[in-house]
Image (cartoon, rainbow, N blue to C red):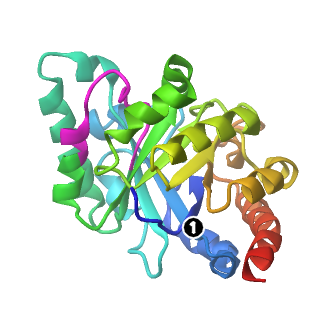
Amino acid sequence: MNEQLKPYVGVSGFVSKEQQVQSLEYADPLDRVEYRLAMGVKAVHKTQWLDIENKYGEDWYPVGEGIADVLLPAVGDELQVAQVFLEPEMLQAEDGDIYARMFMQKIISRTQPWLNGVQFDMLPWQDNDYRSLLDVVREASPDSRIILQAHGPAMNQLGPAGAAMELKKYQDHVDYVLFDASHGAGRGMDTTVLGEFIEAAKDQGIVNVGVAGGLDQYAVDNNLYGFLKKHPGISFDAEGRLHDNWRSDSNALNPRHVRNYLEAAVRVLRPIQLNKDR
């Protein structure tokens, strides 16, 4: 995590190649502002361990072996990420380590046709040492980038300095840390608080960081320019507000929301890049 990596703009909740191709077209200008697109595919306990549909449905969370066909193999530098959620009760059981390893091996095997990234969501990294689990990913998929979500409960529990100290032990095991106080709730982003976590992380030598929570076109336009100018090279990710669940019966990615969000990202990043090049 000490090596500076290309930052990403993330979109999560892909379930089809059609969504992938469309989003890659929208994201083409990102390369000119030295960012890459990250596409997240949900891989959670219920849909990938139990292989049953969850409450959000298959237009957001692919079920079972069908996850293998969600994306085409990467053609450029885009990140194609399995977003993993391990069931807390299973993790805490006596054989939790076995469960975690078997789950990760199952996910990597199923997504192998397109996988080049793994993100751990809501992993209780602040309470237990999961470096050996992260190494399972590194061994099974050595070219994949590993993203560790620094979620709201951990951030609240540890504070900026404490979280950075705890994350430091993972430096050799992950590639990006994603600070996400919302952890899927879609709440608005508090850039002041996030800035404190980013500064603390950088003080510990953690250079590849990202932020998430409540992002869409409007939040990017109104909240991120000053933040990214102050913290250049920060990745950012959006999910809930790019889906239709809040205003319709569909949970699918809305292509208009995705396009508007990516266009806003380029709009905000372009002047920062121009100033950097001068």
Q: Is residue 53 left or right of residue 198?
A: left
Kind of residue at disc 1? Leu
Count of numbered badges drawn on the protein: 1
Q: Position of residue 200 (x, y in %)?
A: 55, 38
Mark 1 nearby-residue class (10 Å; few <14, some 14–19, many ≥20): many
Is residue 165 visible from the viewing direction of this image? yes
Q: What is the secondary structure assignment of the residue under circle 1?
A: strand
- The residue most toward the front is 203
User: Residue 243's x, y, as percent?
Assistant: 67, 46
Q: Position of residue 258 (x, y in %)?
A: 70, 59
Q: Quadrant of the N terminus?
A: bottom left
Above or below for 4 versus 174: below
Residue located at (68% from left, 41% from top) = 195
Q: Is residue 8 magenta?
A: no
Where is mark 1, residue-wise?
Answer: 37
> Image point 63% across, 72% down: which residue?
22
Residue 266: percent from the left, percent from the top?
76, 69
Left or right: residue 73 versus residue 162 is left
The residue lying at 50 percent from left, 17 percent from top is 157
Task: Write the start and end of the magenta stretch as one range.
Answer: 119-134
Q: Is residue 266 above or below residue 99?
A: below
